[in-house]
Image (tube, grey):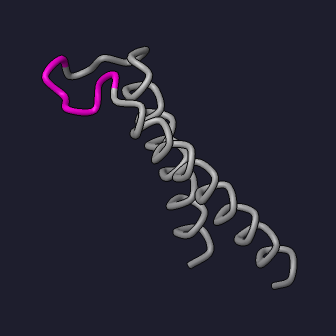
Amino acid sequence: MRTIGYVIGLLMVVFGLIWIGQGSGYFPYPASSFMIVQKIWMLWGAMLVAAGIVVMVIIRRLRRRG
């Protein structure tokens, strides 16, 4: 179960970075995406990255206990 949580946290970080890239225009793929050069997606991406890091830290602390 802890491995699943860690993978979910890692995926949150990856997707958040993709959202930041699309929102800033540095990752314009696919070209028809509604997220490209939309600053709000940079904010959502940053929040998702932060949440993913929190999930991974919590999972790591749970691993140390058990």
Which residue is the extreme one toward the left?
Answer: 32
Name the quadrant containing residue 23. Answer: top left
Residue at (56, 69) in percent of width and height: 5
Residue 50 percent across, percent down from the top left: 64, 52
Which residue shows up at 78% across the image and 74% down it? 63
Residue 44 falls within the magenta-colored stretch: no
Q: Give the camera-side residue of 1 and 25.
A: 25
Q: Which of the image's four quarters has the N terminus?
A: bottom right
**Which residue appears farthest toward the bottom when viewing the image?**
66
Using residue 65 as the reference point, say whether residue 15 is left or right of it.
Answer: left
Residue at x 29% of width, y 24% of height: 36
Magenta range: 31-37
Residue 27 percent location from the top left of the image? 38, 18
Image side of residue 25 versus residue 46, left or right: left
Specify whether residue 32 is painted magenta: yes
Q: Is residue 59 above or below residue 53?
A: below
Pick whichever, 32 or 60, lies toward us: 32
Measured along the vertical axis of the image, is residue 60 above or below residue 28?
A: below
* Count of marks overlaid on the render: 0
Left or right, residue 45 beside residue 58 = left
Residue at (58% x, 48% y) in the render? 49
Main secondary structure found in the magenta portion: loop
Residue at the far right in the pictured view? 65
- Is 37 located above or below residue 34 in the figure? above
- Quarter of the picture containing the C terminus is bottom right
Corner quadrant of residue 28? top left
Horizontally, residue 57 falls left or right of residue 39, namely right
What x and y, as percent, mark residue 6? 60, 62
